[in-house]
Image (tube, rainbow, N blue to C red):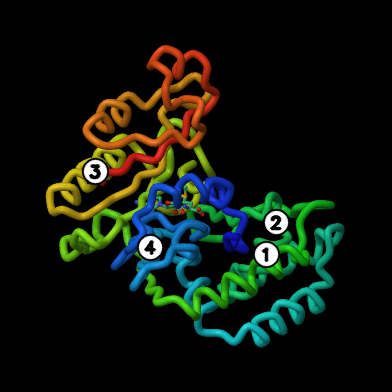
Amino acid sequence: MYIKSPLNYTGGKYKILKPIFEQFPDRIGTFVDLFAGGFNVGINVEADRIICNDQISFIIELYQMFQDTEIDVLLQRIRGLIDRYQLSQQNQEGYLNLRSDYNETKDLTELFVLGCYAFNHQMRFNNSHEFNSPFGRNRSSFNPNIEKNLIAFVNALKQKNIEFHNQDFTSMELAFLGPEDLVYCDPPYIISTGNYNDGNRGFKDWKDSEEQALLDLLDRLHQQGTRFALSNVFYHKGLSNELLIQWSEKYNIHYIDKQYSNCNYQFKERNAKTVEVLVINY
Ligand SMILES: C[S@@+](CC[C@H](N)C(=O)[O-])C[C@H]1O[C@@H](n2cnc3c(N)ncnc32)[C@H](O)[C@@H]1O
């Protein structure tokens, strides 16, 4: 039973945690979730110390607020906002009022509640870092499932030894890590776009230079004797990531969908809608 992030995050790994965790080592000293996003992976890891990093400042601030706030107080604030703005799956005006207020106040509970009522629960920002997700009419709300996920997530944030960073992955200090540690990377996938890499979020885009910088970083971790695990896709909707496919040959490749494990290159390329992998160096 895994904890599901209360943020419905594009590219979230909740559904494939089992095959990912099967490849993780039994004992982990420091675990780094370098591209934490919804933090589905890091929140479920057992490690002495867990480092949660993402370049999106709002998400990291939200997790810090969750960690520092009593769950009852948090739920009370959420219900207070739902009451004040009369939020429902039909009340677009209430949603838009909250959205414009949030863009003034930058209040983190308001941000979370906005995400609950937004289209596909997405947290999107424009280049001025204003929240701009449209209303999720007839679909999105702070429902009992999100509430249950939020409570479990917040409890785990408090119980585990988790610290937060809000940095570009290239600026993270990782040279101190040793053989007991594990760096998990779930970057934007260069051949499939999510909302965090459409260049519209006011944050750094994911391009060939970032892809190469990440592969170089993983090589450096390998040389220093630190374990890493990289989630990515080799093929997606007729596209292939040749740079990644070639680079991965030096390491161990685990196909998330087991049917590809024994197949050749042409089979994968021709038959796959998406081939998801976990590349590990141990
Ligand atoms: C695929 S999502 C991670 C999803 C996460 N594993 C989950 O299960 O919820 C990728 C994340 O990388 C972050 N990101 C993109 N470029 C980054 C960069 N240069 N440095 C740090 N984080 C970055 C995005 O903000 C996004 O949250």
Frontmost of labels 2 and 4 is 4
Q: Which residue is mark 4?
A: 53
Q: What's under tag 2, amino acid-wise?
A: Ala
The kind of secondary structure element at disc 3 is helix
Mark whose residue sits in front, 3 or 2: 3
Residue 218 shown left or right of residue 56 in the figure: left
Give above or below for 25 relative to 160. above
Is residue 51 rendered to the left or right of residue 195? left
Cα distance between the residues tagged 3 and 4: 17 Å
Say what amino acid the circle numbered 4 marks. Answer: Asn
Residue ID at (84%, 64%): 88
Mark sitting earlier along the chain (2/4): 4
Q: Are marks 2 and 4 in contact (CB under 8 Å)?
A: no
Instruction: Find residue 253 and report its image quarter.
Output: top left
Residue drawn where x is 29% and y is 67% of the image: 29
Per the model, the C-alpha gap separating discs 1 and 2 is 6 Å
Instruction: Name the N-terminal-most of marks 1 and 4.
Output: 4
How crowded pointer 4 is (Cα within 10 Å; few <14, some 14-19, many 20+) is rated as many
What is the secondary structure assignment of the residue under circle 2? loop
Q: Which residue is mark 1?
A: 114
